[in-house]
Amino acid sequence: MERIDKREYAELRPVRITRHYIKYPEGSVLIEMGDTKIICNATVEEKVPPFRKGTGEGWVTAEYSMLPRATEVRNSRDISRLKMNSRATEIQRLIGRSLRSVMDFSLLGEKSIILDCDVIQADGGTRTASITGAFVALADACHYLLEQGSIEKMPIKSFVSAISVGIVEGIPMLDLCYDEDSRAEVDMNIVMTDKGEYVEIQGTGEKAPFSSETFNQLIELGSIGIKQLIHNQKEVLGDLSKLIGG
Amino acid sequence: MERIDKREYAELRPVRITRHYIKYPEGSVLIEMGDTKIICNATVEEKVPPFRKGTGEGWVTAEYSMLPRATEVRNSRDISRLKMNSRATEIQRLIGRSLRSVMDFSLLGEKSIILDCDVIQADGGTRTASITGAFVALADACHYLLEQGSIEKMPIKSFVSAISVGIVEGIPMLDLCYDEDSRAEVDMNIVMTDKGEYVEIQGTGEKAPFSSETFNQLIELGSIGIKQLIHNQKEVLGDLSKLIGG
Amino acid sequence: MERIDKREYAELRPVRITRHYIKYPEGSVLIEMGDTKIICNATVEEKVPPFRKGTGEGWVTAEYSMLPRATEVRNSRDISRLKMNSRATEIQRLIGRSLRSVMDFSLLGEKSIILDCDVIQADGGTRTASITGAFVALADACHYLLEQGSIEKMPIKSFVSAISVGIVEGIPMLDLCYDEDSRAEVDMNIVMTDKGEYVEIQGTGEKAPFSSETFNQLIELGSIGIKQLIHNQKEVLGDLSKLIGG
Amino acid sequence: MERIDKREYAELRPVRITRHYIKYPEGSVLIEMGDTKIICNATVEEKVPPFRKGTGEGWVTAEYSMLPRATEVRNSRDISRLKMNSRATEIQRLIGRSLRSVMDFSLLGEKSIILDCDVIQADGGTRTASITGAFVALADACHYLLEQGSIEKMPIKSFVSAISVGIVEGIPMLDLCYDEDSRAEVDMNIVMTDKGEYVEIQGTGEKAPFSSETFNQLIELGSIGIKQLIHNQKEVLGDLSKLIGG
Amino acid sequence: MERIDKREYAELRPVRITRHYIKYPEGSVLIEMGDTKIICNATVEEKVPPFRKGTGEGWVTAEYSMLPRATEVRNSRDISRLKMNSRATEIQRLIGRSLRSVMDFSLLGEKSIILDCDVIQADGGTRTASITGAFVALADACHYLLEQGSIEKMPIKSFVSAISVGIVEGIPMLDLCYDEDSRAEVDMNIVMTDKGEYVEIQGTGEKAPFSSETFNQLIELGSIGIKQLIHNQKEVLGDLSKLIGG
Amino acid sequence: MERIDKREYAELRPVRITRHYIKYPEGSVLIEMGDTKIICNATVEEKVPPFRKGTGEGWVTAEYSMLPRATEVRNSRDISRLKMNSRATEIQRLIGRSLRSVMDFSLLGEKSIILDCDVIQADGGTRTASITGAFVALADACHYLLEQGSIEKMPIKSFVSAISVGIVEGIPMLDLCYDEDSRAEVDMNIVMTDKGEYVEIQGTGEKAPFSSETFNQLIELGSIGIKQLIHNQKEVLGDLSKLIGG
């Protein structure tokens, strides 16, 4: 079976990460993975949530949203329904947890960094691309604080990237596009650091339960993708990447 | 290191599943796992969401909530903040996906079953206990439809249960209570069928990333718990359990 | 005419009050009156509403809600409609007023006690059972403060209980179950202290206006029920009851 | 003790009911009781709530609101808090029940009449004045339907009026103004028909419980006020009043 | 073509401005222009929005709303839809800007004045009548502060009034009533001071674009109306008007 | 006085209009005016608002929003405040009116076209750039319908563009950037067709009222900008532009 865009099963879609995309934020990235396009903006705020007050430690949080016409069919805006989209709620919690796992919050001090991930075009893998792109925006925002003298050392301990893998018509595939994702029997999102450790693994067999062999196969496939994505992050960050995990 | 309640590392807390707990619902279960207590009510409705209309197939969905004082500190109700709790949103999506994975929706026909999981006392593992308890309520609701003659065959393909596992102070443990959960470095929720297949695996290393060895250890530990929970489900369902997956 | 559950016209349903039902709250009661079952949790907070600040006096407030399937037909949750149920609004105001009427707020000091009344199974009389049960939870919460040394004297001046009465097919009846309530021509809720004084009387003749004779008959009938309920409260509170109104 | 406006204890404030106040509604009344001023507009709609569909019977409902500056201190609008005022919720349910009690819904047919009671100046007794004024607007709306030929007979069985009574510094008083109301130990609202029957009685002793003697005294005092108010309603409705209860 | 109410094309409807309409607000006006009737209440608050804090300057803001039955067809309340009416949002922003343009905020000091414009009967031109009426209420509120000694000088620099003009069936007309407004090809709202300067001009040709000749014609026509309205404002304010712009 | 970006007073910022920006919508445009960047997506829906049903005519509506970090300071999302931003409400009403003014709705038939204008970077003039960009997306969406055979003739009667003008430090200027806009004494938005007719004129002198000479000067200046923008629209639409107003 040939993939819809003729990729190898273990091949990522073309990845492009553009830094400094929007001029105002402390970090701003446009990440493109095939036809999936997401603006990831990092905002530094000099305040922390109540449970962090007085601890000397900071916090990282994320918000995820899609433009109404990022998809084939138009979705009405959250505000017209007065309800936060429940899929987006789940996704932004995942992005937040993933980025927090690589932060040294005592180095950040009592500041918050908000990552706004706004999908302008969706073609599968938006939650994982958000993590990969937001990491770069987060690095830029931390670097901005360092340059400003607000912090003394980069508060990021590792690189982190994310990718989706899945079983489509019985075949394990890397980086599913929307068409593949909607036909997948098993769907997995993997978040991993440059040290080869997992930050988050979410595997779902809503259409059909899966065995542990399948599971291990998918994990392996995901690692291949993650390695390349972290390579991409390092390339686009250039010298700044040397300050991470130092 | 001794566990707070002196359990073995691979030991579940005492499990009690009470059927027919509330008199009105088509299925109603009180599940208790240690001090965690959840009422799981199943409601049958003769309508389906728009994307199911005209397909001849049904749907299963879940809602999850906690009484304000199910926890040490009182949480204000969703309606006073006018916002659905985001953790609850994530959880109810997980419960819904888990239960749908074992349904044969063509046997159910164009009906919906709603599983209301209301936590009256929370001591860790509420999302997994909700799945385990809601499955029994779902079985009772399907059986009610069978008895009524609205369906011809039990539309449930497998048993499904869920359990949490985690690494606490370096030690893999089964079925974390709240105190353990809040100290865990790695936290995993496993949803599995009686055929030993996975429906959902969610592993999170927010405090510290984890290796694949850790991951496999936890998966294994989880399987032990799941097997016992499915045994409990079968016991409490008695003869009815023979109609499942038949 | 025989009552649906064969009770005498002036007979209460079986009453059961269980203290310490949920482990976290400062006061926690399960009250059962026939098939009506309500969890009443009391939470102490070290803050008061704006209009009490600096007065040295505390406040008592109540919240009332039903689980979606506490009734024959499932009710959607407030949060899905983004609107507080208007019947619940009316009821929680009544519960709050009733409990405040027996408090000595200067003895309580600048603290708030919130009574969460969550109906898990409804079969008529939920608002009055909430008052009767919440009173016991309130007593436990005040006793907890006394034990803790936060207050010096029990701040409760009297016992208070509530009951419904009504005219069904021309006959005055005590403690209506749902079936009777839905057929009642006149419906009255009575809140009364152990000193035989009224705190609140609400009589409604939506289906048919009523005379003052009817009214007096119902009041009398209500007193019989109240007396027994206060007896029940005293019994379940044991020695603690001696501290009330002292 | 002299009353603040020098009235007798059993004396109403000056009552003025102006019909046809706003030009668009099917019934429109400005009711003034002393400084309390309320616009009561009746709107006929050719639809009924779901539970009435197909029954051949209609429905009456009410909405109650205050202009932000109807009171000494400005109240923010419901929409800025996104929450319906809970006191207003309680009041509009009372107005609805009171008016429904005198309707013959089979004569109305499957129509709804909505009574909007908007308080433009509040000086105590707004809920009872709303009922008294809304009744006249309701009568006008029904008469409009009769004139139009949409119904064949006035669907109103009785006149209904409402008044507040209370104990202020130990003295029973009729028709409390805001100053008296805020000092009252016991507060009661009475809704009564021209046949001397009660539709609703709500007595509250939040500051101090009350005896049944007090209760009966207040009821008696209320009847005096109700009689005069129904006299006012009849006077302002003129010939139309002969069609009521016919 | 004769106008529906036989007015000249350049003639205003009868204008009536009643001061001290509601007893509580610091300024309260009922403005009537033909059948359009609006209550404009001014409330002084001793606080300012965040962006004014510490500047020594005050702020003026407006809220606009219509009673449900101010129009031919009943509009549901904002709170039942949980959404602020979007037309009202636009209008209250216009009223606020218009009134702020004539304020000297350093003379007001750090205070806010809120103008509540509640339409009780709508027959076209409600936004412009709100401005004209609210100006008088604002003047009264400022005068109240002056009398109280809270400010030293009237903080109002000019009179401001507003009027609608439009092209109906090709003819430029002043002060459109609802019937005319709904048939207008071009619709313009003009806000002007007593010095003949414009504060706001909004011209809309939704049905048909318009030329600059049309535009100038309408502006001219508007000035005629504004002059008369400012004359009315001066008349009703009497001596107080001498303190404005002094 | 030199402009911040060295432009002439009557000079537009560099304009770039990119068609087919997002792949899913029926029309999709990225418009850039200097640093202001807006995605304008047009969606065709086969349904109309209630007031259009059965008329054979269609409708055009707009939604306007900004990404949280389109500005110097981050704005929280509407959904976190549960309130539609009031400035955005005003703007999207303006965009909708402007585009509707050039539509022939009988040629469109009973269809709706929704224009989503999402500002990804804001540097002044976002409302006018939204109109100019959305017009091109609207043309593409109509052309799509024509190609599909759903309509027989382009339903657009004229080109329409919009621009801001203002008085900054006494000098009339075209196309204000954010810095100029925030210092402007008078601010005007002009919407105009290729026939030189006005669709909408909104002039505001919140900081200082303005004379009719000022007004006419600004109108003239605006016309210069509009002409160039319509030239840009024609260029980017190429042959398609010949079908407009045909």
Image (cartoon, coloured by chain):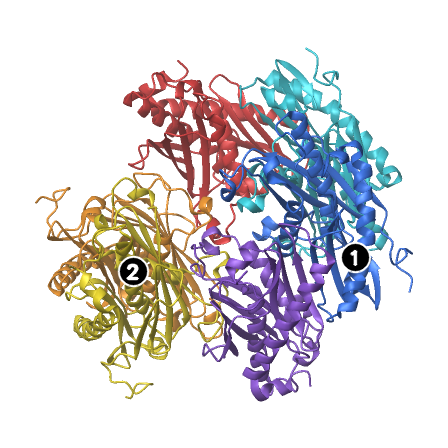
Chain colours: A purple, B blue, C cyan, D red, E orange, F yellow
Mark 2 or 1: the one toward you: 2
Q: Is residue A19 above or below residue B206?
A: below
Res. C106 visible in picture: yes
Q: Quadrant of the N terminus of chain F?
A: bottom left
Identity, as a three-letter code, of the amino acid under mark 2 = Leu
Front-most of residues A4 and C126: A4
Q: Tag count in the figure?
A: 2
Question: Percent position (x, y) of residue C149?
Answer: 84, 55
Front-most of residues D221 and A100: A100
Q: Mark 2 and mark 1, same subunit?
A: no
Given contact means CB atoms under 8 Å apart, are the residues at marks 2 and 1 in contact?
Answer: no
Question: Percent position (x, y) of residue F169?
Answer: 28, 82
Based on the displayed image, in which of its 4 quarters is residue C198 positioned?
Answer: top right
In the displayed structure image, the side of residue E200 where residue E137 appears, left or right: right
Characterize the local packing of mark 1: few (<14), some (14-19) or many (20 or more) Cα atoms within 10 angstroms.
some
Q: Quadrant of the C terminus of chain F?
A: bottom left
Residue under circle 2?
F138
Helix, strand or loop for disc 1: helix
Helix, strand or loop for disc 2: helix
* Residue at 66% across, 74% down: A58
In the displayed structure image, the side of residue C116 where residue E119 appears, left or right: left
Identity, as a three-letter code, of the amino acid under mark 1 = Tyr
Name the chain under label 1.
Answer: B
Residue under circle 1?
B178
Residue farthest to the top, as pictured = C1
